[in-house]
Image (tube, grey):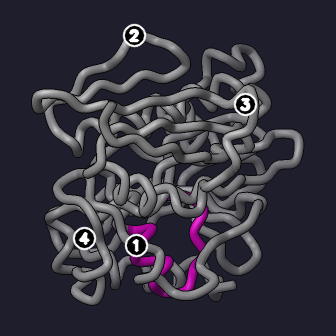
Amino acid sequence: MGWESELGLEVVGVPVRVRCGVAEAWPRLLVANRHLRGVGAAGAVGAEIRGKDGEYGIEVEGRAAVGAADLVTAIRVLHHEVLHAAMARARHLFFVHAGVVEWGGGGLVMPGISGAGKSTLVLALVLGGARFLSDEILAYDPEAHTALPFPRAIKLREVCRPYFPELLESTIGEGEGRFVRFEGLPENCLGTPVAPKWIVLPRWSPEPGFDLRPISGGEALLHLAESALNFGAHRAESLGHLSGLTTGIPCYRLRWNEPRSAAERLRSALGAGAS
């Protein structure tokens, strides 16, 4: 029998137990999930990652193994499958693909698909004093009207590394699987459950500039619906949840290019200091 270790997590309140049979994956999993660590209690979501002959297999909740040809893809698939298994159990929550930070006593929600620059903008905001909830998921509790933390480590894309030279020695992994170690971030940077206060729809642009424009709550709602991950599970209630999320909250579209200046100008434009 080869090398094996086990990692207990708590993902949006759901216990998860990951069995890892890939030694080179272990340090990356520890860094990425440092602040999701839990006890992996009885009845936890069961997950497993294995490697053999240059191929990796991932199995979650007893579903047929998913194959991956490289370690970066294998960890991404594992994280994706674990999150979706946790979402299936946390049916009281509404999930949106979004970056979320806390400042000024409120939550800034930045929904969008991959490539909008959410992780990069979240990282710049956190380095500027905002508190980190997630760079990928809004876990929204409609009853409490709060965004819950999902603090998996922030991803740093290859093309964005030059913007953050002080973090070059504080990452692990490569390509689309590079994570920033929490030791490289400001102390006390983790956020707590917070009511959303602003919604900003970000879009990275290759052209220099910063353009922040107000939009209606209806336009923001449609964009949130496009980025929702469990819209079907809530069915008729989904639009009510999104309406409750957007009602009375300032909403904007943002076109940005350079993350540091965009984060600073966004903070200034919204008129909030870091908490």
Gap between marks 4 and 1 measured at Cα: 24 Å
> What kind of element bears circle 3?
loop
Residue at image position (18%, 58%) is 174
Q: Which residue was labeled with disc 3?
A: 90
Q: Is residue 253 visible?
A: no
Magenta stretch contains residue 163: no
**Closest to the observer: 201 or 90?**
90
State the residue lying farthest toward the top. 64
In terms of sequence position, does the residue under pointer 3 or pointer 1 come before the other? 3
> What kind of element bears circle 2?
loop
93 horizontally vs 116: left or right = right
Of marks 4 and 3, the one in the foreground: 3
Locate residue 75, reporting x and y percent.
33, 42
In terms of sequence position, does the residue under pointer 3 or pointer 2 come before the other? 2
Gap between marks 3 and 2 measured at Cα: 22 Å
Gap between marks 4 and 2 measured at Cα: 41 Å
Q: Residues within 10 Å of mark 1 (few under 14, many from 20)?
A: many
Q: Amino acid at mark 1?
A: Arg
237 horizontally vs 255: left or right = right
141 horizontally vs 168: left or right = right
The label number, if any, that marks residue 181 in the structure image: 1
- Asked if the residue under mark 2 is in contact with the one under mark 4, i.e. CB atoms within 8 Å, the reply is no
Provide the residue span drawn in magenta.
Answer: 121-134
- Asked if the residue under mark 1 is in contact with the one under mark 2, i.e. CB atoms within 8 Å, the reply is no
> What kind of element bears circle 4?
loop
Q: Is residue 38 visible?
A: yes
Residue at image position (21%, 69%) is 160
State the residue lying farthest toward the right. 143
Q: Which residue was labeled with disc 4?
A: 257
Q: Which residue was labeled with disc 2?
A: 64
